[in-house]
């Protein structure tokens, strides 16, 4: 892992870990803030789910994904989870912000900008392959290598078959000539 990734991942993850910890500590406030979304989510689930439990699950997911991302373990998956949570936070905070004053509107805009920035950072991290080829690249090149190998094997088979046919033809002609001359 490069030095920049070694430093940048924990720096980016720290905001998510702290926010997730706050969500876990203040599950009631989180459930209230996320209530419109959590209500829809709990209705869509095939089992009964309390909004407070869903708020804790979101907080725990945020802490877990943040820690995994900071450690570089399953970093792309963790970053993807953090991007989803960050986008969710941006939406909820935008909707629930107090905009009755000029300062409130300014704070709302700053919070939205922060959330969009964090979402962009973890989105970039979610596609970062750390200098290694992506799975799509590897699959594409594996398929190309397989086609190339199959083509070479087919050419070798044609060449070998051609030689065998030529030898068989030669043997048959010799046998015919020998049978006719006898």
Image: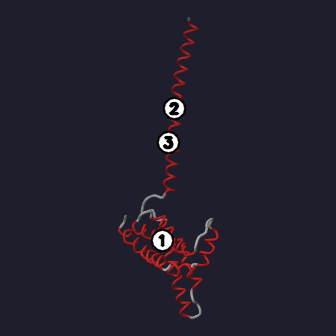
Outermost residue, bottom direction?
101
User: Mark 3: few, some, or many residues within 10 Å (few <14, many ≥20)?
Assistant: few
Upstream in sequence: badge 2 or badge 1? 1
The x and y percentages for residue 148 are 51, 44
Element at label 3: helix
89 w.r.t. 169: above or below: below
- Whichever of labels 2 and 3 marks the residue nearer the N terminus, that label is 3
Residue found farthest to the left: 3
The location of residue 90, given as percent across then percent down, is 55, 79
Q: Quadrant of the N terminus?
A: bottom left
Label 2 neighbourhood size at 10 Å, few (<14), some (14-19), many (20+)?
few
Measure the alpha-carbon separation of dots 1 and 3: 49 Å
* Residue depth check, mark 1 versus mark 3: number of the one nearer the observer: 1
Q: Which residue is mark 3?
A: 149
Q: Is residue 76 left or right of residue 1?
A: right
Relative to 84, say whether 108 is above or below: below
Residue, x 59% and y 78% (percent of image)?
35
Label 2 secondary element: helix
Which residue carries the number 1 mark?
60
Q: State the image coordinates of residue 114 (x, y, percent, origin top left).
A: 50, 81
Q: Residue at x 44, y 71 (%)?
A: 66
Instruction: Say the numbered circle drawn on residue 159.
Output: 2
Q: Residues within 10 Å of mark 1 (few under 14, many from 20)?
A: some
What separation in Å lies between label 2 and label 3 (alpha carbons)? 15 Å
């Amino acid at each position: 892992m490069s030095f920049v990734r070694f430093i940048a991942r924990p720096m980016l993850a720290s905001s998510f870990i702290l926010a997730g910890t706050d969500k876990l500590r203040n599950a009631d406030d989180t459930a209230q803030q996320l209530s419109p979304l959590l209500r829809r989510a709990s209705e869509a689930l095939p089992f009964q789910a309390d909004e407070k439990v869903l708020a804790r699950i979101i907080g725990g997911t945020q802490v877990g994904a943040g820690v995994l991302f900071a450690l570089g373990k399953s970093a792309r998956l963790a970053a993807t989870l953090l991007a989803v949570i960050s986008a969710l936070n941006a939406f909820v905070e935008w909707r629930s912000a107090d905009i009755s004053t000029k300062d409130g509107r300014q704070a709302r805009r700053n919070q939205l900008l922060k959330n969009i920035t964090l979402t962009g950072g973890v989105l970039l991290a979610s596609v970062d392959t750390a200098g290694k080829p992506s799975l799509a690249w590897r699959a594409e090149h594996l398929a190309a290598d397989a086609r190339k190998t199959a083509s070479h094997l087919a050419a070798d088979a044609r060449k070998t078959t051609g030689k065998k046919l030529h030898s068989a033809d030669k043997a048959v002609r010799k046998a015919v000539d020998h049978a006719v001359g006898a």
